[in-house]
Amino acid sequence: MEYNQWTTAIYLGPDTILNHPDYVTRLRDEIGLNTVVLSFTGEMPDEVLSLSPFKGRVPTDEELGELVLRHFDGRPIDPLEYERARELCGPGAPLAGDDATLRQAVAQLKSEGLKVWTCGGAWTIRRLMFCPSREDVADWMEAACVHWASDYDVDALDITHFRYPMGSFPLGLWGCTCASCESAAQSLGYDMPGMVADLKQARESLRQLDGRRLGEVARLGLGFFDIVHALGMRSGVLDWFRFRCDLVHRNLTRFRSAVHAAAPGKAFGTDTYPASMALMAGHDYLRWDQMSDYASPLVSHISAFICNTFIEWARFLQQEVTDLTEEDALRIVYRFTGYDGMGLPDTIDAYQADEAATLGYRIPTADLVLRDIYKAKLLLPDGVPCYPIIHGEGWGRDNIDRIVDETRAMGCNGVVWQGTAELMDYKLE
Ligand SMILES: [Zn+2]
C-alpha cells in the first residue's frame, strides 16, 4: 500500500455499488474517493468452512452458549443476539454468501481505478462476542482472514469487530472468564481468580461511597488517584484490562502474520475503538504497529459507543452509590473517560438517546470526535498510518469540515466516510 497519499475511503456493500454504478464514480470525481471498504458478502470455501466452530450447521442456543463470552458471574452474554449469530456460517462471515455479486463489485471498483479493502466481521456482533481465547474460534478467524486476503483482487483487509463489546454494554466489560480464558490468562502471566476478586472488591468499595460527598468532590475536581483511592483499587483491576488487550494483541499478531505469509503486499488492518475508551474494548494503541498495518479510529459511532456509554455508566453509578445525583454521575463519567470540559449535556434526557440520527446536533460533536483523534495520535507508534472513520451525514457540514481540516493538520493519512449526504448531492435508495 502507498501511505504517502491522502486516503479517501468509504464503507459500501456490493449491492449499493452495483445498483448505483455512478455513485462511486461521482464520489471519485467530486470528493477524491480513492478507496472503497467493501463488506464481505461472499462465500467461504469448503476447506475454510471445515474449520468453523459452527461445524457446518446453524448453531443451537446451547452450542452458542459454549462459544460466546462468559461474564464473571457465570452468565453467557446477551442471548438476544443469538439470532444474528445464526445468520453466519462462523464468526464474522455470512451464512448465505454470494461470491458472484461480490466479485462483480470488486471488478467494477477496480475498473474505476479505486482501491478495494475487504471488510469482514470478527468476534463481536453488537453485544455478543465469540470467546477470543478459544482455539477453534482463532483457527477459523485466521483461515477466514487468509481467504479474504488471498482469493479476491483486493488491496487490503479491513476487519471490523476484532474487539470486546462496546462500553455501553456493561456486561461485556466483565468477560470473558470461561475455562479457555482462564488458561489463556495463565499463559499470559495473569491470575484470573485474583483479577475477578479485585474487580468485585472495587465494586464493593464503590457501593460504600457517600453519593453527596462524591458529588461534591466531582464538582471540585476528581483525579486519577482519587479514583484509585476511593475504590481501594487493587492491581487486578488494571490487570483485567491489560489481560484483555494482551489477548487481542496475541490473536491479531497471529492473524496478521498469516495474511502477510499468504498474500504478500496486502495490508492487514482493523478499525480501532475510540482512544478514550479503547482499553474497555481490548485495543492497546501503543502496540498497534505489532498487530495491524494501520489504525482506523472508529470515532463515527458517537451514539452507540460514546454517548450510550455515558448514559449506561451514569445509571450504573446511581444504582450503586446512594444519593448520587444524575448530574454528578454524568460529571464523574465525563471526567473518568476523559470527555469533561467540552460542554456535554448535564442530564440523560438531554441526549434524547432514542433519536440517535440527530444526536450530532445536540452535542459538541467536532470537539468530541477530534479529542479522540488527538488521543489516537498521541498513543499510536510513529509511522502507523491513521484513517479516522467519520460521518459524512448527520453532523453538519461545518463540523465535518473542521474535523477533516484538523485531522489533516495533525498528520493523519486519510479518512473513511460513513454516509455522504453532506458531502455530495446524491440520492441513494
Ligand atoms: Zn473465554
Image (cartoon, grey):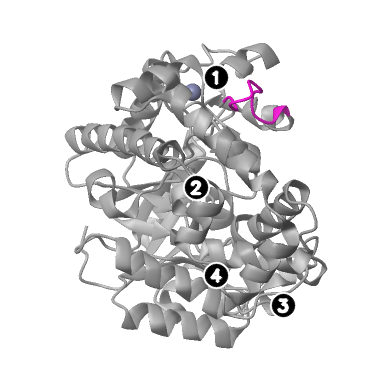
Residue at mark 2 to residue at mark 4: CA–CA distance: 15 Å
- Mark toward the viewer: 4 or 1: 4
Which residue range is magenta in the image? 70-79
Amino acid type indicated by mark 4: Tyr
Res 184 → quadrant: top left
Q: Earlier in the sequence, mark 3 or mark 4?
A: 4
Mark 2, other Cα within 10 Å: few <14 / some 14–19 / many ≥20: many
Q: Is residue 312 left or right of residue 177?
A: right
- Mark 2 lies on residue: 280
Q: Where is residue 157? Give x, y as percent.
A: 35, 46
Q: Residue at x 69, y 45 (%)?
A: 207
Query: In 3D space, how far apart are the residues under numbered discs 3 and 2 (Cα atoms)?
Result: 25 Å
The amino acid type of the residue labelled 3 equals Arg
List the residue tagged with mark 3.
362
| Count of numbered circles on the image | 4
Residue position marked by numbered label 1 in the rendering: 67
Q: Within 10 angstroms of label 4, few (less than 14), some, or many (20 or more) residues?
A: some
